[in-house]
Image (cartoon, rainbow, N blue to C red):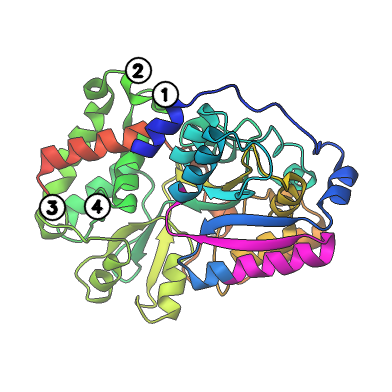
Amino acid sequence: MKLLLLVAAFCGPAAALAEPDPSDWNAVLKEADGQTVYWHAWGGSTPTNAFIEWIGDKVAQDAGVTLEHVKLTDTADAVTRVLAERQAGETQDGAVDLIWINGANFAAMKQGGLLFGPWSDRIPNNALVVEDDVVTNDFGTAVDGLESPWAKAQLVFMYDSDDAAPLSSMGEIKDWAAENPGRFTFPQPPDFLGTTFLKQALVSLVEDPAVLQDPVEQHDFDAVTAPLWAYLDEITPTLWRSGKAYPATGPAQFQLLSDDEIDMAPSLSPSEASTAIANFQLPESVRTFVPETGTIGNASFVAIPFNSGSKAGAMVVANALLSPEAQLRAQDPEVLGYGTVLDMDKLSRKDAAAFADLKLGIATLPPADLGRALPEPHASWSAAVESAWLSRYGAE
């Protein structure tokens, strides 16, 4: 949090759009040939690291770009490096060329003028990207061409089809929990998935969801969130262990499902249940559903710092991440199982057929059945909702 405040405070003038010009893609490719791109990205997943290595092979072969994966445990480390370079007057050839960035750090870097762009809405494969709020707003902050999406996540609900069935709304989930006490749960906030469940209920119940795109301090928090607390007051006593205990994480719910302690729980990855079934972590009867009004979705983005010395190469990498070949590979549950950010209607018939033919797993909904991805509230709502939940329900 201190880092975000420091970046926000360091609000020098935004870097002007510099060459290379993403609208002249041939010139970008020419400049990118021979560049080395240092992609600072989370390094805690072997499958993800292998995918980034594959992308490196692809851009090396296709464009002569060398991709170096700088493995992070915290995105803030890369942001700190860019900020330190800015303060030291190092405005060219910085150490960070591309960042796998999260919403809070993107907002801070955008406000602090630490990003190159706009560029992401001008690279060729952006024309294939789906048009929805998930890729135009990042936790309430407008993207404005300063970062490029490359993967999607969306809240789904896992259920044991031997004992439960898909439900159409958050209200029906509450009613089902009342009729089946102890059989539904969610991870304890501030676990990311647990907080997402709270935000899902809030987005679904609030009178005007648009207010959630503003910083929380711009509105009367108690008034806006009143429907959420009314909902939770009803559902909490009907949860697993009467709402007096919660699983610590999303994967911790697997054991509860496997041990037949619960029949329903949320997941932020549409393919997670299928992967868990394949790994014998969940029973084969588990399936997933989404309410008819949609569920919270978010995207993974990459951004280019203002002082990257390989902006052309970084754009080539971002463009490669949006290629149908890369998106199909990322969606393969045996590779990553990430959701695609591409619009199937914008693809060639051959590419669309490849996505349609991809075996997503026994419990994974096809992209068309995931429904509308609801935008994440502004990042400031998360901490406020978490704090209020802890004080109200005492699950410290």
Q: Is residue 69 located in the magenta-colored stretch of the structure?
A: yes
| Whole-number angstrom distance, CA of label 4 to CA of label 3 | 15 Å
- Height in image: 371 above or below 327? above
Mark with earlier residue (2, 3): 2
Residue corresponding to mark 2: 218
Residue corresponding to mark 3: 243
Task: Answer few, some or many: residues within 10 Å of disc 3's Cα (few below 14, many 20 plus, some between 14 and 19).
Answer: many
Residues under numbered marks 2 and 1 in contact, where contact means CB atoms less than 8 Å apart = yes
* Residue 236 drawn at (x, y percent): 15, 47
Residue corresponding to mark 4: 176
- Height in image: 212 above or below 105? above
Mark linked to residue 246: none
The front one of 290 and 300 is: 300
Q: What's the residue at 11%, 49% (across, down)? A: 237
* Residue 266 drawn at (x, y percent): 34, 56
Q: What's the residue at 32%, 38% (across, down)? A: 382
Q: Amino acid at mark 4?
A: Trp
Instruction: Give the extent of the magenta segment.
Output: 50-75
Mark with earlier residue (4, 3): 4
Which quadrant: the N terminus? top left
